[in-house]
Image (cartoon, rainbow, N blue to C red):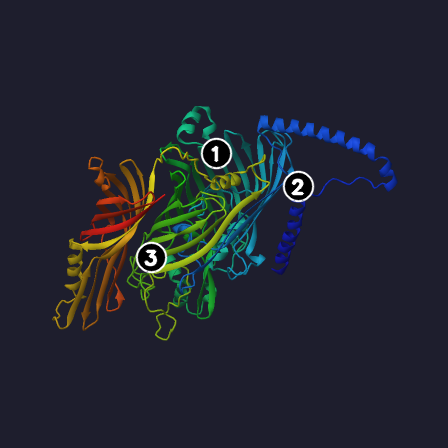
Amino acid sequence: MKLQTAQKLLFIVAAIPTFWLWAQGNADKIRLNRPAAPASFNAAKEESTEAAAKADAAAATAVKTEDATDLEEKKSGFKIPKPFFFNMYFRASAQDDFGYNSPTLGWSPFYGRLMNETPWLMADFGYHVVRPETPGAPRATLFMRIEGGSFRGYDKGQGSLGNFNINHIWVETENVLAKTLVTQTGNLWYNMGYIGIFDNFTSQVFYDTIGFRAGQRTKWFEYFAGVGDSGWSIYRNRSYDGWQGHQYAVIPTVGGLVKLNLYEMQALKSFSNKFMPKWQLGTTFQMMWERESETNRGAPNQTPSVAYADVMRGEAFKKFMLENPGNSDFFPWAQSTGANYWRGTLWTGFGGPEFGPLKIYWNDLSVRFEKKAPQIAVRETYDNESKDIYISSFTDERYEFTLYDEIQIRLLPNHFDLNAGFAFGKSWDNDNRIRPDDHNSTRYSVVVRPMWYITEHLHYLLELVYSREKSTIGNRYREHFNSIKSNTGGIPDVDGLEWGDTDTKHTYQIKTGFTINPAGRGIYSRPVIRLLYGVQHSNVQGAFGNSFEESLNRRNQFNLNRDIHWHHMVRVEFEHWFSVSGWEEGYMPPMAQQTERLSQVHKGEDIDPSKPKRYDIFTTLWGGWALQVGPMTTGLADRYVNDADGCLGLTSRQCVINYSTGGVSGGGHVTARSGDIAYTGGMWFLPVYQFTVDRTTGNTESSLNFFAVTAGVRYYLPFVPESLKGIFVGGELGYGIPLLQYSVRGSPKSVDLGTYVIVTGNLGYQYRLSEKISFEAAARFVFMPTSPVSLAIIPTVGASYHL
């Protein structure tokens, strides 16, 4: 380990002065040419006039040559690449989650990468060993990528070089053996689409393979086929499963890619340029084999005469010993077996046309279907003796389908952009139909991130997330701190193989705050400094990285003994990527193309002050009092009070009800008005009720509120007198995130209210005080098709600021 760390340190120490020397030489501060032979002072003085004349002539020739070269480059669009290129990405953050000490708001970037990732650094180093002097000339490029996630003061790794890896190193050649022929030797990784909002590489091939690939790259298409070994990558992935006996074995791998640049094809060029600019389509496939091996304990093997259910409980060896006391030496030996697994992907990416103020900057759609590598073994211990149970045949039927999509949209030039993503995954294990786990689940996540450009460099960000994860064969999740971990009444196994009291996990996240973008507008404009607040609500207990003591032993003083469904966090973070001398000059590999797309800085459109503004854009903060008038309030009161948890069977002296409905409401909306039509959307708070049932046998408490997100249309009446021109009517449609808390005698209890769709009707009047300020008074009529139905009227007043 010390030797590896020293080698990495030596590499970085050598790379820094090399890069500096090249940069200085490129700026003509240091000449990299061999110096002329020394001459005496007198000889130099006598020949100074002649040398000056020669220097002038050489300079004139150089200028002419340079001018000719520049002219040729302008004609062909080709530039001779510089010898080195360097690219870097990094992010780091500091946060406080008010006592829980988690580095992230939720479990993973599946809930949106914002506030769900830890520090990271990626550095790319490239050297054009052979630089093409003309279009189509031979090229050879060495590429290396170093990645890791540790900085001093940011994590427990404290920036140690042991936390970084050389993830990729390869040599790529082009036009060497034949025109347009491209080869790559070393790491064979190729990625088509990067889903930035989830930080996901779905449509990739050969990430885990070392070998050789060859193909053709033209402006119309690209294809290649490759062969190599994925053994060390599979070994590394398996090393995290807890078994200590893994060994390396060669895993032959073959695969390939076909990608079409449809926007360059004559038959589709007109359609693509009009509706789907830069339209590309690609697919990949990769196949891996593991041979049978009688000498490698880390190869696929299967222990005969054991039941998978016993292995899941960790009782296979115990059961054998109970049936065969004292005969541990006769525990069945594993039998070697083979395995094969594969991965196929499909990807398309395109820009979009403009529809009035709307424009699709870019859309990435990636799909992957794969068969997973089998697990090798687990270790069981009984009566101080341990045995390895090989389970390759029990785990070689695991499949997964995933789909990711991300879209970047301009909503209003210079003012609003929208980044949205959708993720879907389904996993199934044909060998396991008895215990819930991550290999038998269906899940999806929706992320919406609007960005409001307050000024060129100060932006306001909001991200809304909803995720649903469902176990397909039983209870997988624990809702409360005292939920059972092992459900002895589980389904379908009578001995119990479930883990908790629900099969579905719901996660809501809201992240909001200001960003500082020195480079200007753009959701992916970098560098960026973010000042954020985030909140997560999940029905699952402690649904974020934590180190809670979960033992229910009464002597465990560190058990919180309460449910934790909310997680709040404030964070400051910065993120940046950049390239030096890079990819845009004569050589742009696919990874650089992705970076270029994400690095678009949308500077906006020039506005002619002599022309009237096309849109009146304003932000409104409003407040009011919600009056609940529907059956929701009395219905829930009946449901919870007139049952065993309420006042059923108790006298008025034994049970006292304190009840209130509605309450203070308020929120914020952003509106864009053009003529008599305005489009509006925002977030607001909808209180429904709260009540307490004071019982002699223990209290029942409940409160229900909604965090609402809605969008809709306003219509300003044009036919009214001039003094009443501010009257408007409108409607909005959205979704309410339930902020529901219900407990009986101190123990939380689940409540299902059905759907949480929100429909509102609006009637109001807006008074324009000045060019920048207006006030409004309105009434909101709220309908929710919950069970029972919720109805409310909210009189409101608000103030607006106009851009």
**On the rendered image, what quadrant is the C terminus found in?**
top left
The residue type indicated by label 3 comes to His
Amino acid type shown at disc 1: Lys
Q: Give percent across and percent down for residue 603.
A: 46, 39
The answer to which quarter of the image holds residue 726 is top left
Q: Is residue 627 left or right of residue 324?
A: left
Q: CA distance from mark 1 to mark 3?
A: 41 Å
Give the percent coordinates (x, y) of residue 30: 71, 43
Q: Mark 1 highlights which residue?
A: 259
Q: Which residue is mark 2?
A: 27
Q: Is residue 662 above or below residue 143?
A: below
Mark 3: few/some/many CA within 10 Å (<14, 14-19, 20+): many
- Choose top left, top right, bottom left or bottom right for residue 283: top left
| Label drawn at residue 537 | 3
As drawn, 428 above or below 476? above
Which residue appears farthest toward the bottom when viewing the image? 555
Task: State which tag comes first along the sequence, 1 or 2.
Answer: 2
Q: Nearer the viewer, mark 2 or mark 3?
A: 2
The numbered mark at residue 747 is none
Which of marks 3 and 2 precedes in the sequence? 2
The quarter of the rendered structure image containing the N terminus is bottom right
Q: Is label 3 in a helix, a strand or a loop?
A: strand
- The residue depicted at 48 percent of the width and 34 percent of the height is 258
Q: Helix or strand or loop: what does disc 2 sit on?
A: loop
Indicate which label's residue lies in the foreground, 1 or 3.
3
Between marks 1 and 2 in the image, the one whose residue lies nearer the viewer: 2
In the picture as drawn, the residue positioned furthest to the right comes out as: 42
